[in-house]
Every structure is written in structure tokens, then in C-alpha cells.
Image: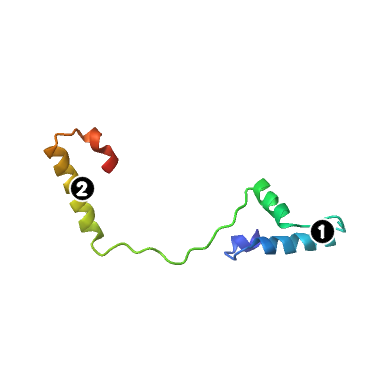
Amino acid sequence: MDHRKNGIAVSTKMILIEVRRLAIEMSITDFAGTASWCKRFMRRNGLCMHTKTTIVQKLPREYDRKIIEFHKYVINTRKKLCFETGQFSGFL
């Protein structure tokens, strides 16, 4: 848990290595420390693997203008077809 708090990636292999070390340290001889044990351990303790993202998707240069154009299109279409605002709610 300390690795994770410090922003260091933790893998299931790292968990298994540490838990096997602890089992030896505690003189537990019948502990196998398998991948399925690790999966169940993580589920029981509300843990999951996350992939650290490094690349952020950039918005198009004309993003603001395109959003305004789309809103105008929806409003004009609604008026042209005589739709009430509530009937077009899925678009806005």
C-alpha cells in the first residue's frame, strides 16, 4: 500500500512476492501464494489494478466554435420542426 500511496506502480507479481516473503517470515509452510489467491485477496480488500495514463487526448482547435455551431443547429432544427425543448433533450 505504501508504494501505491507514493505513486509507484504495484503489480500482482509484486504482491505475490511480498506475501510469500511474509509467509516465510511468519513460518507459514502451506501457503502457495497463487495468482488466483491474489485475485481473491484483491477482491476481498477492494483493490484493483489501474493503468497509469500519460497521454491526454487533445481537443480539436475549433472545439468551442463547433460546439456553438451544433447548439445553434439543434435550436434551429427544433424551431423549424416545432419540437418542444423537452422533446429534444437527448441532444443537449
Could you say where residue 30 lies in the image, as x and y percent from the top left? 86, 55
Q: Judge whether residue 92 can be spotted in this image.
A: no
Q: What kind of residue is marked 1?
A: Ala
Could you say where residue 20 lies in the image, as x and y percent from the top left? 78, 61
| Circle 2 SS class | helix
Place residue 84 in its image quadrant.
top left
Place residue 61 in its image quadrant.
bottom left
Name the mark on residue 34: none
Q: Which residue is drawn at 70% across and 60% down?
A: 15
Q: Which of 28 and 83 is in front in this view?
A: 83
Horizontally, is 51 left or right of 16 in the view?
left
| Circle 1 SS class | helix
Q: In the orientation shown, which residue stands out farthest toward the left?
A: 80
Query: What is the CA distance from the residue labelled 1 to the residue labelled 2?
Result: 62 Å
Q: In which quarter of the image is the C terminus?
A: top left
User: Mark 2 = which residue?
Assistant: 71
